[in-house]
């Protein structure tokens, strides 16, 4: 099953948005030091846009992110385990995800754009750290949908 079909089911998409929101919350909370402080401050700005802004943003970008990751997912299916395949190359997975957000941010405005541009260079390692958990989320939802 391809990743792009996962977001087509409204209940599955909503559950994935919940899981991804929780993952981001956990990732940001775990950051330490000056860079962690900067990330936490930026995250508060993003969450301050509105109580549902983050969930909405994840929901809007999710179909594009799944489409972008789909070729890599299929490579992983060919090797036998797409979840492990994504986990084995966190740098590539992160670049794919960031290319989607880079494209979307070009058509945006407001405080979120400024925050993103300030953090973009340093955020790749944060996304890479989240790849194993994200891969697990994708695998969980792909499996649940294929068994439905």
Image: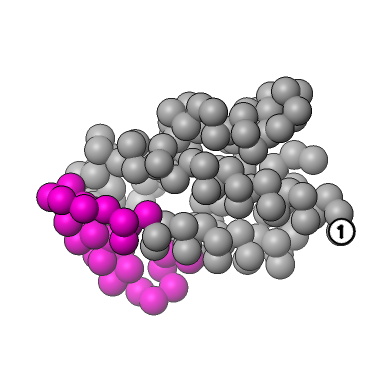
- 28 relative position to 119: left or right: right
Q: Secondary structure at mark 1?
A: loop
Q: How is the image coloured?
A: one colour
Q: Residue furthest left?
A: 34
Tell me what residue is drawn at x 31 percent, y 61 percent: 29
Q: Quadrant of the N terminus?
A: top right
Q: Which residue is mark 1?
A: 148
Tell me what residue is drawn at x 24 percent, y 44 percent: 119
Picture coordinates of residue 13, whole percent (x, y): 65, 60
Q: Eyeballing the image, is 141 above or below 1?
A: below
- 38 relative position to 23: left or right: left
Magenta highlight range: 27-55
Q: Is residue 44 magenta?
A: yes
Tell me what residue is drawn at x 15 percent, y 51 percent: 33
Tell me what residue is drawn at x 41 percent, y 37 percent: 128
Q: Residues within 10 Å of mark 1 (few under 14, many from 20)?
A: few
- 35 relative position to 108: left or right: left
Picture coordinates of residue 21, whole percent (x, y): 47, 62
């Amino acid at each position: 099953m391809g990743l792009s079909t996962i977001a087509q089911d409204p209940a599955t998409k909503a559950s994935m948005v919940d899981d991804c929101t929780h993952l981001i919350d956990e990732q940001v909370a775990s950051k330490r030091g000056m860079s962690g402080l900067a990330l936490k401050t930026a995250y508060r700005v993003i969450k301050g846009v509105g109580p549902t802004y983050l969930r909405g943003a994840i929901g809007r970008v999710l179909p594009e992110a799944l489409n972008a990751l789909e070729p890599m997912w299929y490579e992983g299916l060919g090797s036998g385990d797409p979840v492990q395949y994504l986990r084995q190359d966190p740098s590539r997975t992160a670049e794919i995800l960031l290319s989607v957000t880079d494209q979307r941010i070009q058509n945006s405005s407001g405080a979120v754009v400024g925050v993103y541009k300030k953090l973009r260079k340093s955020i790749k390692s944060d996304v890479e750290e989240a790849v194993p958990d994200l891969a697990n989320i994708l695998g969980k939802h792909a499996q649940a949908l294929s068994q439905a």
